Image (cartoon, rainbow, N blue to C red):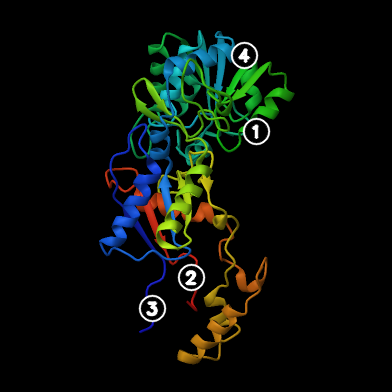
């Protein structure tokens, strides 16, 4: 009988991963045991994906807020620091802000508005229009902001991040002043020592600040990019991609994921003679239509993957073929015509009309988003995702 199922993504349950655990063995054993249990049959071009959280945990890639504070003080001087464009997150940035505040006498916290970089809103954009505020030009003090818009409440959590971040800085013994601006150069009116906390726009922000006279300009990727007093670290991303572990501990983005994924690929091949692809994934890259939140708070979707996941899809649009090239066909004749077209398609469709609308994004971004949605961030207990049929097409 003809196969009726295409792509399947399964969340695999695994033991709770602790620091020092042999993650390669845990992942391989989980997959082989699932196959033995009859859950699926391992095949060539199947994809194994592991969430970055358990990779970092197994690596023991943690730092305390005191270790972060020592790095902040050493690199930014320990006096008044401009902290600009942070995302609004209790899990992501708040724990980092604690460490940053411990390493300074005063924090000038500059928030972008109406939302942060990943779409967490401080104020509804329609209110800006109503009040005649231009977020590209207008600089607001905290008093200005509250007079215009009142207290800010997050769409989903109800958290007032302005008050929350202010109190957090005070708890760590630093003074704090909050301003609202989307122009990086605004912060230079308050201090020349600046920490740019944006994620995907950080290179531009740092360039603008340095060209405008910033004396010490760093990003989150410049903090804990090497070990400080025995801390964990990330050579490429610093504290970007980090999460709260405890009230005083930060879990950093994992290091050297390439060795992990290639080793798992090799071990699976030795056991099954099947060539699978393997990747580590973090946040997916998608946007919530209600809260307008863009999910990607990690610096990349995938910090490590095997070479078979490099590149973008090369697919044709079935409905385009059905409506255009083969508009006069139906049923089995239509199926055979499209199947034959797919078999003979160009190896690089590029901007061909027949490929329009096929989402030419990187494979790791697409698959990582699928994995993030499959595993979730709650209590599913499935840090490994097993995907089959992703590289199939209508003819397989």
Q: Locate residue 95 relative to residue 104 in the image: left or right.
A: left
* Earlier sequence position, callout 3 versus callout 4: 3
Looking at the image, is 380 positioned above or below residue 152? Answer: below
Separation (CA) of disc 2 from disc 4: 55 Å
x then y, percent, for residue 318: 53, 76
| Residue located beneath label 4 in the image | 191
- Of badges 2 and 4, nearer the viewer stands 2
* Earlier sequence position, callout 2 versus callout 3: 3
Residue 3's mark?
Answer: 3
- Of badges 2 and 1, nearer the viewer stands 2
| Residue located beneath label 2 in the image | 392
- Identify the secondary structure beneath mark 3: loop
- Of badges 4 and 1, nearer the viewer stands 1
- Identify the secondary structure beneath mark 4: loop
Density class for disc 1 (Cα within 10 Å; few <14, some 14-19, many ≥20) is few
* Earlier sequence position, callout 1 versus callout 3: 3
Q: Nearer the viewer, residue 40 or 131?
A: 40
Looking at the image, is 49 positioned above or below residue 297? Answer: below
- Identify the secondary structure beneath mark 1: helix
| Residue located beneath label 1 in the image | 203
Separation (CA) of disc 3 from disc 4: 64 Å
Q: Which residue is drawn at the image coordinates 38% and 23% (left, top)?
A: 249
């Amino acid at each position: 009988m003809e196969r009726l199922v295409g792509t399947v993504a399964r969340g695999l349950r695994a033991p709770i991963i602790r620091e020092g655990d042999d993650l390669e063995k845990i992942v391989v054993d989980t997959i082989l045991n699932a196959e033995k249990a009859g859950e699926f049959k391992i095949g060539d071009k199947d994809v194994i994906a592991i969430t970055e959280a358990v990779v970092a945990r197994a690596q023991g890639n943690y730092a305390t807020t005191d270790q972060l504070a020592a790095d902040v003080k050493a690199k930014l001087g320990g006096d008044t620091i401009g902290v600009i464009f942070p995302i609004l997150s209790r899990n992501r940035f708040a724990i980092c802000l604690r460490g940053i505040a411990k390493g300074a006498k005063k924090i000038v916290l500059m928030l972008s508005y109406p939302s942060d970089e990943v779409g967490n809103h401080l104020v509804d954009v329609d209110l800006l229009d109503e009040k005649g505020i231009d977020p590209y030009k207008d600089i607001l003090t905290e008093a200005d902001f509250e007079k215009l818009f009142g207290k800010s409440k997050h769409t989903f959590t109800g958290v007032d991040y302005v008050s929350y971040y202010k109190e957090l800085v005070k708890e760590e013994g630093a003074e704090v002043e909050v301003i609202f601006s989307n122009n990086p150069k605004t912060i230079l009116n308050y201090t020349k020592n600046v920490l740019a906390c944006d994620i995907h726009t950080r290179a531009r922000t740092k360039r603008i600040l340095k060209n405008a006279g910033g004396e010490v300009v760093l990003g989150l990727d410049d903090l804990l990019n090497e070990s400080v007093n025995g801390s964990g670290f990330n050579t490429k991303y610093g504290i970007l991609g980090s999460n709260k572990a405890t009230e005083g501990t930060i879990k950093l983005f994992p290091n050297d994921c390439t060795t992990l994924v290639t080793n798992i690929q090799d071990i699976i091949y030795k056991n099954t003679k099947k060539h699978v692809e393997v990747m580590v994934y973090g946040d997916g890259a998608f946007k919530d239509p209600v809260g307008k939140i863009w999910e990607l708070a990690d610096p990349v979707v995938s910090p490590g993957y095997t070479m078979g996941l490099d590149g973008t899809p090369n697919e044709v649009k079935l409905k385009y073929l059905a409506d255009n090239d083969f508009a006069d066909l139906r049923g089995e004749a239509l199926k055979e015509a499209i199947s034959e077209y797919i078999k003979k398609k160009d190896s690089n469709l590029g901007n061909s009309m027949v490929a329009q609308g096929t989402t030419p994004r990187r494979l790791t971004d697409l698959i990582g988003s699928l994995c993030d949605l499959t595993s979730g961030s709650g209590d599913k207990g499935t840090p490994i995702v097993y995907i089959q049929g992703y590289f199939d097409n209508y003819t397989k």
